[in-house]
Image (tube, rainbow, N blue to C red):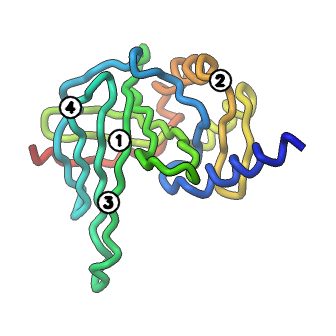
Protein backbone atom coordinates (compact mmCIF):
# COMPACT_ATOMS: atom_id res chain seq x y z
CA UNK A 1 0.00 0.00 0.00
CA UNK A 2 2.95 2.36 -0.43
CA UNK A 3 1.36 3.73 -3.58
CA UNK A 4 -1.59 5.35 -1.73
CA UNK A 5 0.53 8.11 -0.10
CA UNK A 6 2.23 8.83 -3.44
CA UNK A 7 -1.09 9.01 -5.27
CA UNK A 8 -2.45 11.38 -2.60
CA UNK A 9 0.66 13.56 -2.92
CA UNK A 10 0.29 13.68 -6.70
CA UNK A 11 -3.36 14.70 -6.46
CA UNK A 12 -2.55 17.44 -3.94
CA UNK A 13 0.32 18.67 -6.12
CA UNK A 14 -1.97 18.90 -9.12
CA UNK A 15 -4.65 20.78 -7.25
CA UNK A 16 -2.39 23.35 -5.64
CA UNK A 17 -0.95 24.93 -8.74
CA UNK A 18 -3.08 27.02 -11.04
CA UNK A 19 -0.41 28.42 -13.30
CA UNK A 20 0.90 25.65 -15.54
CA UNK A 21 -0.41 22.37 -16.91
CA UNK A 22 2.93 20.66 -16.19
CA UNK A 23 4.37 20.49 -12.68
CA UNK A 24 7.29 18.56 -11.26
CA UNK A 25 7.81 17.03 -7.84
CA UNK A 26 11.59 17.43 -8.20
CA UNK A 27 13.69 20.52 -8.83
CA UNK A 28 15.75 20.28 -12.02
CA UNK A 29 18.35 22.65 -10.55
CA UNK A 30 19.93 23.20 -7.15
CA UNK A 31 20.69 26.61 -5.63
CA UNK A 32 24.43 26.17 -6.29
CA UNK A 33 23.78 25.47 -10.00
CA UNK A 34 21.48 28.44 -10.57
CA UNK A 35 22.73 31.26 -12.77
CA UNK A 36 22.17 34.97 -12.29
CA UNK A 37 20.83 37.36 -14.93
CA UNK A 38 20.77 40.89 -13.48
CA UNK A 39 18.27 41.97 -16.15
CA UNK A 40 15.66 39.65 -14.62
CA UNK A 41 15.45 41.67 -11.39
CA UNK A 42 12.83 44.38 -11.35
CA UNK A 43 9.26 45.48 -10.85
CA UNK A 44 6.90 44.66 -13.71
CA UNK A 45 3.27 45.36 -14.55
CA UNK A 46 0.79 43.74 -16.91
CA UNK A 47 -2.43 45.68 -16.77
CA UNK A 48 -3.14 46.03 -13.05
CA UNK A 49 -1.17 42.91 -12.07
CA UNK A 50 2.31 43.42 -10.59
CA UNK A 51 5.31 41.13 -10.35
CA UNK A 52 8.42 41.90 -8.29
CA UNK A 53 11.56 39.84 -8.88
CA UNK A 54 14.19 40.57 -6.26
CA UNK A 55 17.95 40.29 -6.58
CA UNK A 56 18.84 36.63 -5.99
CA UNK A 57 20.42 35.47 -2.76
CA UNK A 58 22.40 32.24 -3.00
CA UNK A 59 21.08 31.67 -6.52
CA UNK A 60 17.43 32.04 -5.45
CA UNK A 61 15.21 34.84 -6.76
CA UNK A 62 12.34 35.89 -4.49
CA UNK A 63 9.23 36.62 -6.54
CA UNK A 64 6.05 38.36 -5.46
CA UNK A 65 3.07 38.25 -7.80
CA UNK A 66 0.00 40.33 -7.05
CA UNK A 67 -3.19 40.06 -9.06
CA UNK A 68 -5.53 43.01 -9.30
CA UNK A 69 -8.94 42.49 -7.69
CA UNK A 70 -11.89 41.62 -9.87
CA UNK A 71 -13.85 44.73 -10.78
CA UNK A 72 -16.33 45.49 -8.01
CA UNK A 73 -14.83 42.88 -5.66
CA UNK A 74 -11.87 44.45 -3.83
CA UNK A 75 -11.42 41.40 -1.58
CA UNK A 76 -10.52 39.17 -4.54
CA UNK A 77 -6.98 40.55 -4.95
CA UNK A 78 -4.38 37.89 -4.29
CA UNK A 79 -0.64 38.07 -3.72
CA UNK A 80 1.57 34.98 -3.95
CA UNK A 81 5.21 34.46 -3.14
CA UNK A 82 7.53 32.21 -5.10
CA UNK A 83 11.17 31.24 -5.34
CA UNK A 84 12.89 31.00 -8.70
CA UNK A 85 16.12 29.42 -9.87
CA UNK A 86 17.38 30.39 -13.30
CA UNK A 87 18.80 27.85 -15.75
CA UNK A 88 20.44 28.71 -19.04
CA UNK A 89 20.31 26.12 -21.78
CA UNK A 90 22.01 26.51 -25.15
CA UNK A 91 18.89 28.18 -26.52
CA UNK A 92 16.76 29.48 -23.63
CA UNK A 93 16.61 30.93 -20.14
CA UNK A 94 14.27 28.93 -17.92
CA UNK A 95 13.06 29.92 -14.49
CA UNK A 96 12.20 27.01 -12.20
CA UNK A 97 9.42 28.45 -10.04
CA UNK A 98 8.16 26.95 -6.78
CA UNK A 99 5.68 28.35 -4.29
CA UNK A 100 7.32 29.86 -1.22
CA UNK A 101 4.45 28.56 0.90
CA UNK A 102 6.01 26.90 3.93
CA UNK A 103 3.10 24.63 4.78
CA UNK A 104 3.48 20.91 5.42
CA UNK A 105 0.08 20.32 3.80
CA UNK A 106 1.22 21.63 0.41
CA UNK A 107 3.53 19.78 -1.95
CA UNK A 108 6.26 22.10 -3.25
CA UNK A 109 5.77 21.53 -6.97
CA UNK A 110 7.99 23.12 -9.60
CA UNK A 111 6.78 24.95 -12.69
CA UNK A 112 8.99 26.08 -15.55
CA UNK A 113 8.77 29.37 -17.39
CA UNK A 114 10.81 30.42 -20.38
CA UNK A 115 11.88 34.02 -19.79
CA UNK A 116 13.22 36.74 -22.05
CA UNK A 117 14.36 39.60 -19.79
CA UNK A 118 14.99 42.95 -21.43
CA UNK A 119 15.67 46.56 -20.54
CA UNK A 120 12.01 47.63 -20.87
CA UNK A 121 10.05 44.41 -20.52
CA UNK A 122 10.01 40.80 -19.42
CA UNK A 123 8.50 38.20 -21.72
CA UNK A 124 7.35 35.05 -19.89
CA UNK A 125 5.69 31.81 -21.00
CA UNK A 126 5.01 28.56 -19.16
CA UNK A 127 6.64 25.45 -20.62
CA UNK A 128 3.47 23.37 -20.81
CA UNK A 129 2.40 22.96 -24.42
CA UNK A 130 0.70 19.83 -25.73
CA UNK A 131 3.83 19.22 -27.82
CA UNK A 132 6.00 19.28 -24.68
CA UNK A 133 3.54 17.03 -22.82
CA UNK A 134 3.91 14.48 -25.62
CA UNK A 135 7.70 14.53 -25.22
CA UNK A 136 7.32 14.20 -21.43
CA UNK A 137 5.00 11.18 -21.77
CA UNK A 138 7.60 9.48 -23.97
CA UNK A 139 10.70 10.35 -21.93
CA UNK A 140 9.79 11.04 -18.29
CA UNK A 141 7.90 9.53 -15.39
CA UNK A 142 4.47 11.16 -15.42
CA UNK A 143 1.12 10.99 -13.65
CA UNK A 144 -1.88 12.81 -15.07
CA UNK A 145 -4.98 14.29 -13.49
CA UNK A 146 -7.86 15.84 -15.41
CA UNK A 147 -6.01 19.13 -15.73
CA UNK A 148 -2.32 18.55 -14.88
CA UNK A 149 0.66 16.48 -15.84
CA UNK A 150 2.83 15.72 -12.82
CA UNK A 151 6.44 14.80 -13.52
CA UNK A 152 8.05 12.34 -11.13
CA UNK A 153 11.46 11.88 -12.78
CA UNK A 154 14.72 12.60 -10.90
CA UNK A 155 16.40 16.01 -11.11
CA UNK A 156 19.14 14.99 -13.56
CA UNK A 157 16.59 13.58 -16.00
CA UNK A 158 14.46 16.74 -15.74
CA UNK A 159 17.51 18.94 -16.36
CA UNK A 160 18.41 16.99 -19.48
CA UNK A 161 14.80 17.25 -20.71
CA UNK A 162 14.76 21.02 -20.20
CA UNK A 163 18.15 21.41 -21.90
CA UNK A 164 16.85 19.50 -24.92
CA UNK A 165 13.42 21.13 -25.36
CA UNK A 166 13.08 24.51 -23.60
CA UNK A 167 14.42 26.50 -26.55
CA UNK A 168 11.97 24.99 -29.03
CA UNK A 169 9.15 27.41 -29.85
CA UNK A 170 6.70 24.48 -29.70
CA UNK A 171 7.45 24.00 -25.97
CA UNK A 172 5.40 27.01 -24.87
CA UNK A 173 2.47 29.15 -25.85
CA UNK A 174 2.33 32.87 -26.49
CA UNK A 175 4.49 34.89 -24.13
CA UNK A 176 2.98 37.34 -21.68
CA UNK A 177 4.67 40.74 -21.81
CA UNK A 178 5.35 42.50 -18.54
CA UNK A 179 6.36 46.17 -18.72
CA UNK A 180 9.31 47.09 -16.53
CA UNK A 181 8.30 49.79 -14.04
CA UNK A 182 11.63 49.83 -12.25
- How far apart are the two marked residues, 3 and 2, measured between alpha carbons? 31 Å
Label placed on residue 154 = 2
In the rendered view, would you say 70 is above or below 132?
Answer: below
**Residue 126 or 57: which is nearer the viewer?**
57
Q: Position of residue 20 (x, y in %)?
A: 52, 48
The picture places residue 17, in percent across and down from the top left corner, at 53, 53
What SS does tag 4 mark?
loop
Q: Earlier in the sequence, mark 3 or mark 1?
A: 3
Q: Residue at x 17, y 45 (%)?
A: 43
Q: Nearer the viewer, mark 2 or mark 1?
A: 2
Q: CA distance from mark 2 to mark 1?
A: 25 Å
Residue found at x 46% / y 21%: 30
Q: Mark 3 sits on what residue?
A: 79
Q: Which of pointers 3 and 2 lies earlier in the amino acid sequence?
A: 3
Judging by the rendered image, the residue that carries numbered circle 4 is 55
Tell me, for residue 36, which label it has, or none: none
Instruction: Quadrant for residue 149, please give it.
Output: top right
The residue lying toward the viewer, choosing from 158 and 123, is 158
Q: How many angstroms separate mark 4 from mark 3 (CA)?
A: 19 Å
Q: Quadrant of the N terminus?
A: top right
Q: Are marks 4 and 2 in contact (CB under 8 Å)?
A: no
Q: Nearer the viewer, mark 4 or mark 1?
A: 4
Amino acid sequence: MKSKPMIALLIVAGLLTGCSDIVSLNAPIQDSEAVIDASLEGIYAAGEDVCIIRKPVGGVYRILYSEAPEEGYPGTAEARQFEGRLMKTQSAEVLDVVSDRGDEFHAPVHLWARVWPGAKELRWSWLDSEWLKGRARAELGTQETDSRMILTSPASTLRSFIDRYAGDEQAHGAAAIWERIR
